[in-house]
């Protein structure tokens, strides 16, 4: 089944639960991951476990694109 997300998208809204998913990169290891945007301040990197801050403003030119996503992040602190 093809993905409903375009390769150059920086965010996606789920059609079943209406959650907005954004794509971010870890500042420490560079791991590209998807996270729900409702996590307003921070998330835990899915690879190295570091705390990553979610930027308040996102520019398209510097944002992680959907095509490069390698995994998913976790809540901070991780439960």
Image (spheres, helix red, strand yellow):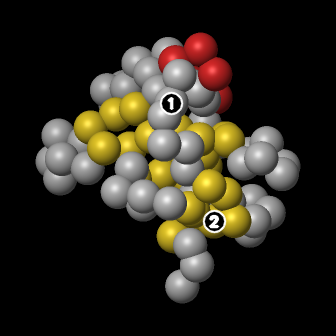
Name the element at disc 2.
strand
Q: Quadrant of residue 78?
A: bottom right
Q: Is residue 51 visible?
A: yes
The answer to whether 28 appears left or right of 52 in the picture is right
Q: Can residue 3 be seen in this view?
A: no
Name the residue carrying label 2.
44
Q: Residue at x 48, y 51 (%)?
A: 35
Name the element at disc 1.
loop
The residue at the far right in this view is: 29
Decide: few, some or many residues near mark 2? Use Cα within 10 Å; few <14, some 14-19, many ≥20. many
Q: Which of marks 2 and 1 is in front?
A: 1
Q: Residue at x 63, y 65 (%)?
A: 44
Viewer-closest of 39 and 1: 39
In percent of width and height, residue 66 lies at: 52, 28
The answer to whether 61 appears left or right of 1 in the picture is right
In percent of width and height, residue 1 lies at: 34, 31
> Is tag 2's residue or tag 1's residue first in the polypeptide sequence?
2
Q: Residue at x 83, y 51 (%)?
A: 28
Viewer-closest of 38 and 2: 38
Name the residue carrying label 1.
58
């Amino acid at each position: 089944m093809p993905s409903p997300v375009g390769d150059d998208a920086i965010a996606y809204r789920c059609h079943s639960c209406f959650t907005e998913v954004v794509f971010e990169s870890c500042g420490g290891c560079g791991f590209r991951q998807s996270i729900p945007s409702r996590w307003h301040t921070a998330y835990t990197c899915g690879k190295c476990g570091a705390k990553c801050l979610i930027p308040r403003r996102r520019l398209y030119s510097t944002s992680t694109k959907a095509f490069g996503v390698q995994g998913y992040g976790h809540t901070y602190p991780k439960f």
